[in-house]
Image (cartoon, coloured by chain):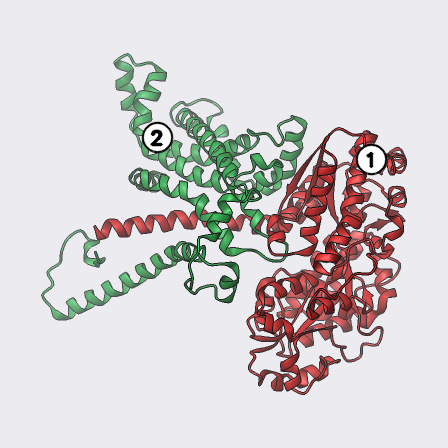
Amino acid sequence: MAFNPSDIAGKKVKENLPAEKAKKGILTVILNFILIVFSVTCMFPLIWMLYSSLKLSKEFQADIIALPKAPTFENYIYVANDPNSHIWTSLFASFRTTIISIIFIVLFSFIVGYILSRIDFKLNKIIYGMFLLGMLIPIHSLLVPIVVVFQKCGMYNKWFTLLLPYISFGLPIGIFLIESYLKGIPVELEEAAAIDGSSFTNTLFSIILPVCKPILATVGIIQTFACWNEFSFALVLINDVKYQTVPLALTNFSGQFSTNYPRMMTAMLITMAPIIILYFLFSKQIIKGMVAGAVKG
Amino acid sequence: MKKKLLSALLSVAMVSTMLVGCGSTATTETESAPAAEETATTEAAATDEATTDAAATTASSEVTYKGDIEIMHYSTAEEENSKNGGATAFRYAIGEWEAAHPDITLTQNVLSNNDYKDKIATLAASDSLPDVFMLQGMNTANWADQGLILDLTDAIKNSPYYDKYTQSYFYAFTADDKQYAVPALTAGTCCQVLYNKEIFKAAGFDEFPETWAELIAAQDKIKAQGVDYVMGFANGDAWQANSCFLSTLGDRFTGADWTYSLIENTGSKFTDEAFVNALTATKDIFASGLFNPDFNSASQQTGNDYYVSGQAASVICGNWDATYVYTNADPELIAKTGIAVLPQPDGATASQKTHDIGMGYGLAINPKVAEDPEKLAACLDLIYEITGPTFADYVAENFALTGLTQTADVDLSAFDQFTQDCYTFNENPGCEIYDSYIDSAVIGVLNQDVQAMLSGQMTPEEVAEETQAEYDSVYGN
């Protein structure tokens, strides 16, 4: 359905005058054109990756935009079977790291966010400020100290190595969003629960948690993308092939002076698939959460 | 229904653009690497004499070690797939050594070159380097000062292949007369011109023009043969103009002694007239209209593709690009491709027909390994084998390339003319590659400034002054 500017006001204006009609028509065309251009720029990379993955490197180099002349699944067969690309092990490692991280990020952000927003104690503002400062520190400046600490603590290059940095760097944004969201929820909700004899824990998890679902989904989604794509920590903290996450495995498709782009795109599509499926499954929840985050956050 | 379909498509596009974004982390990461390197907090401990002795005594002993060895390198499977001779032979030699030592678990950490550089810089800064790793020539002096690499001087002398080593390649890994790494992978030129003989013949040249003046004067004639550009080049990563052009052109103006003096900090300056003249010549040549207009931002692959696709009549590149062109170009184009040295610029008299050649990376050992003499012996054995004849013979026989050890009687007859020409091209007089020797911080400034100069934002004098200032601060002048 085309976008009609008069819908913005939420009411249909009488369109009697031909001049006014023409004006609106032109505006509709322009606005739709802008939206279409924007949509195409968003969608094209994916479509381009899809059809380029069906080309071989030589054909791709000859013309990077052209459609494949003789589509082939050779890249898919190679990526799926080649032991050097270890795409399946890296997918498993990424899943494990992402799922565990998200569970903890959401849980800790929710509890800390709730306490900071509802309980007034002396260090409340300072603790909140310190969490927010976490968002301001560029992670590259922390790579060396973190490597040193992990080496000394014997936590370097283990299956759980990436959990700690992912969870701790995911908390600030989570706490920030949840704390702001909770401010918009009336305290009377908890007061009513307290009158009915609900304990603190019960109120927190049975009354407040369901209310916070949209913002928890937002935090979960933002952090899923962040954990799935994270590269710097994975690069410096992981050596073993079996613990390497997807972004690291993808570097195997790059050489020093050349890159097999169609093969790399194939691997990207395979590794993106789970996230896309996840997105389809939870698309309603995600959009709700995004809107909630935008309005309240 | 249509609405649902459109929203589904938009959703997919949004998710995918977020995911595709992961590629860019690598780029931003690259920029951070020098910072990580600079902020190195590692305690600077001089390499202790005891470890040096250990390296010497265990060098030629038998491998009795049973346990783990960790090696980090950048010869990825993709390198092998794209028929990179050095990487293929390197992986082959490692495989051979691994098979011959079943009691040792060799853990390989293989990353693409860019990621490798980032990671090794971080590991060096946190003093947690792997047992064996690839050391870039430019880091030798700095890392040796910090005690991050084991002195291998005696171990190299005790190598079973010592007599076969081409000694000049060790220069990049020498600091204070001590050698810290064994040069690895292939020795190949960093600067050669691949050109379409047919096009140049039609424009009146039986051989590639010997001077830049001739080439610039003939550019219209050459373009009239149906090509867009006379030369393809790519400096998108900023190091190419330095490694694949300026190191050679500079040598023509300054001569080798100036370069050695600069490396050893015994008097040469970037602000010396000869070097400024080389910068000026570089600027003028790139402004002459010979090149693809996007040369300063194009990726290495794009530069080569101009030649492969027939848009450019020639391309300036390193030996690795020759492999790329050979693999990707039409066999007909390969048959008419000639190889030449960089033409001579006006006013350059210090040397002629030179090309910069060397081995940019060597295998080094973490000094902590020396605490276990058996492990050290195993690491040394690994290095001897993957830089020795197993490697050199493999690259010579399969790719007509050379390694650290000399291979006698390479039979070139099995290779086509182009491959033979690539092999014999190395007989031209060699000169040094700046970025194999000079400290990485100085090279970083030079690379960025040359790139800025080529896009008209800086003058040659400004480039020379800024680079010299960084050189003075790094070398403590």
Q: Are marks 1 and 2 on the same chain?
A: no
Does residue A130 appear in this view? no
Q: Residues within 10 Å of mark 1 (few under 14, many from 20)?
A: many
Q: Nearer the viewer, mark 1 or mark 2?
A: 1
Residue at 51% from the left image edge and 51% from the top image edge: A264
Residue B175 vertical placement versus B288 (above, below): above
| Mark 1 and mark 2: Cα distance apart in space | 63 Å
Residue B10 vertical placement versus B332 (above, below): above
Residue extending furthest toward the top = A197
- Amino acid type, residue under disc 2 in the picture: Leu
Residue that carries the numbered disc 1 in the rendered image: B377
In the rendered image of the structure, the colour used to display chain B is red
Residue that carries the numbered disc 2 in the rendered image: A182
Q: Residues within 10 Å of mark 2 (few under 14, many from 20)?
A: many
Please tell me in which quadrant of the rendered image residue A111 appears.
top left
Instruction: Give the percent coordinates (x, y) of residue B64.
Output: 81, 30
Q: Is residue A187 left or right of residue B129?
A: left
Instruction: Give the percent coordinates (x, y) of residue B97.
Output: 74, 40
Residue A293 vertical placement versus B332 (above, below): above
